[in-house]
Image (cartoon, rainbow, N blue to C red):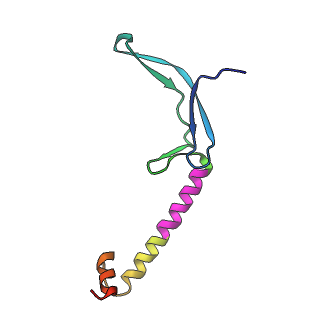
Amino acid sequence: MSEWIGKIIACDRCGKECRLKLLGEIELDGGFAHAHNFEKIPETWKYRYEIGYLCPKCNAEYQSFTAIFMNDAGKRDEEEDDDGQGDDDWTTRACIEMGR
């Protein structure tokens, strides 16, 4: 069994792992504090605030999903503007539909 020293980053969607080797330590405060220096995360791996780390495959799926969602949202906004109600917010439209 071989020993491996480093850091493992896992995709928060599918669980695929990326291993980062330990390059060394950096001494801070004259040697009292140490910080570990790891390899950089590959550029194909992305960190999303709302999800976490994504592998290249999951990141591509996420990008296509958000593009479709944003495209559909833009179409809905255009359709709502065409109904003559202007740029009212959704609460005003809901109250009008409910008769309040």
Considering depth in this image, is 78 or 11 the residue closer to the camera? Answer: 11
Quadrant in the picture for residue 43: top right
Asked if residue 77 lies left or right of residue 59, the reply is left
Measuring from the top left, give residue 33's x and y in whole percent: 38, 16
Q: Main secondary structure of the magenta part?
A: helix
| Residue farthest along the right direction in this orientation | 1
Q: Magenta part of the protein: which range?
A: 58-71
Quadrant in the picture for residue 1: top right
Considering depth in this image, is 67 or 98 the residue closer to the camera? Answer: 98
82 lies above or below 37: below
Residue at 63% x, 23% y is 4
Asked if residue 4 lies left or right of residue 71, the reply is right
Measuring from the top left, give residue 6's x and y in whole percent: 57, 25
3 lies above or below 80: above
Residue at 46% x, 75% y is 75
Considering depth in this image, is 8 or 22 the residue closer to the camera? Answer: 8
Residue at 59% x, 22% y is 5
Measuring from the top left, give residue 3's x and y in whole percent: 66, 20
Considering depth in this image, is 14 or 21 the residue closer to the camera? Answer: 14
Residue at 39% x, 81% y is 80
86 lies above or below 27: below
Is 6 contained in the magenta span? no
| Residue farthest along the top direction in this orientation | 30
